[in-house]
Image (tube, rainbow, N blue to C red):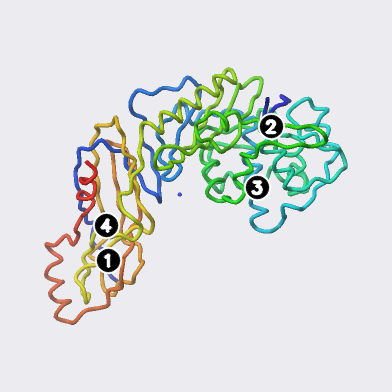
Amino acid sequence: MDADASRPAGWRAPPLRRAGALLAAALLVCAGLTGRTAAAEGGFQSNAPSAILVDYETGTILYEKEADRPIAPASLAKVMTAAVVFDRLKSGKIKLDTEFFVSPDAWRRGGGPSGGAAMFAEVNKPVSVDNLLTGAFAISGNDAALTLAEGVGGSESVFVRLMNETAQKIGMKNTVFRNATGFADAAQVSTARDLATLAQYVIRTFPDYYPVFARPGIDWNKIRQRNRNPFLEAGIGADGLQVGWLKDVGNNALISAVGGAHKQRLVAVVLGAKTEKERLDEGKRLLDWGFQSFQQRALFSGGREVARAKVFGGAASSVGLAARGPVYVLASRVSTERVVARVTYRGPLVAPVAKDTQVGTLTVSRGQAKVLEVPLYTMSDVPSGSLARRAFDGAMTLTGDGIRDVVGKVLAKLH
């Protein structure tokens, strides 16, 4: 066991109809609903063996290097421990003032006798969940993490099952957890991509508890300890999450920071750095590059008409289509690759058409990479029209494509 484990997504429909605009733009496009991969631009390279940088709002990957390489997460595993505990707090199954007793096993393997990062909680004594959160996730105490695991799951092994179930649920495809601390275990692995997914899940799902990661520290058992995450004081707007170390792996970091004029949040992962200094330097370089190279701008506000779809036999000949939420664009200062924006829908639609029915998709691609795919929904009800109207539409469906694409006009305004 390497102690530190942290250390100091009838009628037969005609084919899809398409409308689009071919745009030459210095843009990286992505959605506030569904993020896709975008290749890094501008020659940036990280020296870390494995790294990834993700725009939190859109899920767009701004940079990746060996992002699917399996590696032991070290104390970054505690972020999943936090996710499981936060879920129980959010559901009301436990409360911040709930107390858990520190077992002899938690004390021996994770406390003072272990020689690793510890809260120094006393054996067989009760500690509130609130204090254990600080102990486990601000100062990376292994005794606090084990006490939370045993208190929530009844045993660490049951808790680890909850960790793996959560990992599968949120799309961590290449991750296996074996303990709640991050202690060395040959079967416990994750990837930079999976850990970025975990960070986004925690920040989005548990906004009331996420600030725990940035608590300044704790005074416990007459021992004062500061938050172990050096990125919090690195001047890059970091407010979480964890750092870790294992002897045979190196130094890992899972970081989230807010910066730039538009208060953009980025999530960065650095795995396998040789030293703590290299971990800090590479994390800062990655985040600084992201904030300097990309600017988030709104393409459509939520509910704004993106296109119109032809309606067959309706009281109206077409219906507006819109995304449910805002759609964003990440403007790059260095890319000159062409952007293709298209709206597709299965049509013509046949009346009656109900409001808020998903009928189309807004898709944006850069080169061969699809970087945006947002569902589009009908903006209003369209009841059946008169017999004459339906006969007229029957004649028109042979020639009309029934769609007005406004994506190109909006993108052009960004030039």
Asked if the residue at tag 1 contacts the one at tag 2, i.e. Cβ–Cβ closer than 8 Å, the answer is no
Amino acid at the residue labelled 4? Val
The Cα atoms of the two marked residues, 4 and 2, are separated by: 50 Å
Asked whether, in this view, residue 266 is left or right of residue 349, the answer is right
Q: Which x, y percent locates residue 148?
A: 74, 44
User: Could you say whether the residue bearing mark 3 is in a helix, strand or loop?
Assistant: helix
Amino acid at the residue labelled 1? Arg
Residue 306 numbered tag: 4
User: Could you say whether the residue bearing mark 2 is in a helix, strand or loop?
Assistant: strand
Q: Which residue is mark 2?
A: 226
Q: Earlier in the sequence, mark 2 or mark 1?
A: 1
Q: Earlier in the sequence, mark 4 or mark 2?
A: 2
Asked if the residue at tag 4 contacts the one at tag 3, i.e. Cβ–Cβ closer than 8 Å, the answer is no
Q: How many marks?
A: 4
Asked whether, in this view, residue 201 is left or right of residue 359, the answer is right
Amino acid at the residue labelled 2? Arg
Q: Earlier in the sequence, mark 3 or mark 4?
A: 3
Asked whether, in this view, residue 46 is left or right of residue 163, the answer is left
Q: Nearer the viewer, residue 412 or 79?
A: 412
